[in-house]
Image: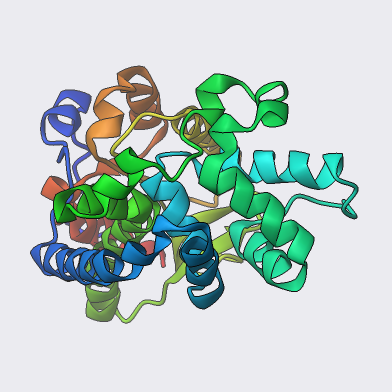
Amino acid sequence: MSEVIARKIEFDELFNSTSMFYVNKEYEQTIEQEVQNKVDELYHELQSIDTKEGLKKYIVEHKDSLDNLTSLMEISAERFKRMVSMIRKERGFVFSTEWGLGKIRTAMMESPAMMESVINLIWAGRDDEKLKTKIPSFYLDNMAIDKTTLQKLTDKNSIRLFVKRGLEGRYSNNIGDLVLNQIEDKIKAVCAKHGLKYQKDIRVPVLDRSVSFVLESPQSPKVIIDVSYSVTTSSSQGSKKEAARKTVEVLDRQRKSGNNIIYVNFLDGAGWIGRQSDMREIHRCSDYVLNFNNLNLLEDIVDSYIAEF
């Protein structure tokens, strides 16, 4: 065993040092430029949808037209897809599975009947007497290209709002990637120091699940690292807790047979503040816990057990 003794931080220290949000200035500048470019692009493109023929031309000419229109009209893409599914079913179109927005657009260009049906829904579905008997007014109310909708197109600030809403999912995914990249950089440096190997996002047979990182191999793990960065609370955090419980049970059995595998959890982000009980249980199940403010402790952890590698 190395003379270095790694320290498991107390729960209160983990909790109090949590970074509520991950800030990467370079990425923020990149996404802001993307938003500005998209706003300028849509400001010019969407001026043409003030007639049904202009709306049709816009859909045909722009691959992301339905994404943009559903955002502009403040209706979820999922809800819009349900409405289109109902139209397909009611009007006798061949129906085997629900279509995504891209497939809906393709079908519109291939079928004049589908083009007319969906155009009518977007242009003035709110005023369609037949649709009003089948779709709740709460959903249908936004289905109209009217003065209110067109007014938004003259205001770049309004366009900016729905552009940002449309980018929220990708923004969150990219932040998740940046978090993993920063942690991986630290792991890479520690491994280089000792001539160790690591693998990421890989299934570890002894756990029968995938982990974020493992040193040195999934077949012969020495350090297992799970990473969870969360800005909002979600049911997945409860799943992380259950995974931690099962993991410590497996590793306890391994240790009794002489196979000492170290279990590390990285927990950070405002979402964990709202799931304190889950966070506390994961802390209990872990040999060590880390966040961005304590990431340097990873080096002490590996130094402490390097003799066992």
Q: Is residue 284 left or right of residue 29?
A: right
Image quadrant of residue 214?
Answer: bottom left
Name the residue rendered at 22%, 67% in the picture: 186
Q: Quadrant of the N terminus?
A: bottom left
Q: Is residue 143 left or right of residue 304?
A: right
Q: Is residue 216 left or right of residue 43?
A: right
Q: Can residue 249 be seen?
A: no
Q: Quadrant of the C terminus?
A: bottom left
Q: Can residue 196 be seen?
A: yes
Name the residue rendered at 21%, 45% in the picture: 291
Q: Is residue 26 left or right of residue 160?
A: left
Please state the horizontal and vertical placement of residue 267, each as a whole percent of the image: 30, 41
Please state the horizontal and vertical placement of residue 272, each as a whole percent of the image: 29, 30
Image quadrant of residue 243?
Answer: top right
Give the vertical position of 26 relative to 15 (above or below).
below
Name the residue rendered at 55%, 64% in the picture: 202
Tell me, what colour scheme is on the image? rainbow
Please state the horizontal and vertical placement of residue 293, each as a whole percent of the image: 11, 47
Is residue 252 or residue 163 the one in the foreground? 163
Please state the horizontal and vertical placement of residue 206, each as a whole percent of the image: 64, 52
Is residue 104 or residue 144 the one in the foreground? 144
Name the residue rendered at 39%, 42% in the picture: 146
Is residue 223 or residue 37 the one in the foreground? 37
The number of discs equals 0
Is residue 9 or residue 270 the one in the foreground? 270
